[in-house]
Amino acid sequence: MRYINPLFIYLLIYILLIVCVVLAAVLAAMPFLGTYFAAVPAIIDLWLVNGRKLEAVAIFLAHYLPTLFVDTAMYSEIKG
């Protein structure tokens, strides 16, 4: 079995973290996407890197469910 340097693994995780942060910043700045799309990098990081599936699902639900109710309530008030 081939030895993998732990420094290489830390470097890959660090690069993935930077990509997730940049992707979250770009997605948060785009007004045509829902706010829950900004949570996707955090969900990927929690699920794949840290192995925290329950927390990843909780973050998704915390970002997605309010858009179902708040957006509907706001759009129902707009007449046009």
Image (cartoon, rainbow, N blue to C red):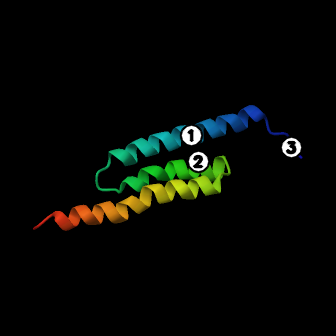
Near mark 1 (Cα within 10 A), the count class, few <14, some 14-19 or many ≥20, is: some
Q: Position of residue 32 (x, y in %)?
A: 29, 56
Please state which amino acid type lies under the numbered disc 1: Leu
Furthest residue to the left?
80
* Residue drawn at 51 percent across, 49 percent down: 41
Classify residue 15 by image quadrant: top right
Near mark 3 (Cα within 10 A), the count class, few <14, some 14-19 or many ≥20, is: few
Q: Nearer the viewer, residue 65 or 49?
A: 65
Q: Position of residue 57 (x, y in %)?
A: 56, 59
- Label 1 – label 3 distance at C-alpha: 26 Å
Dots 1, 2 in contact, CB < 8 A: yes
* Label located before the other in sequence (1 or 3): 3
* Residue drawn at 38 percent across, 44 percent down: 26
Residue assigned mark 2: 45
Q: Position of residue 55 (x, y in %)?
A: 59, 53
Please state which amino acid type lies under the numbered disc 3: Arg
Name the side, left or right, on which 54 lies relative to 42: right
Q: Position of residue 23 (x, y in %)?
A: 45, 45
Residue assigned mark 1: 17
Q: Which callout, 1 or 3, points to the residue nearer the camera?
A: 1
Q: Nearer the viewer, residue 64 or 15?
A: 64
Furthest residue to the right?
1
Count of marks placed on residues: 3
Q: Nearer the viewer, residue 42 or 70?
A: 70
Residue assigned mark 3: 2
Q: Which callout, 2 or 3, points to the residue nearer the camera?
A: 2
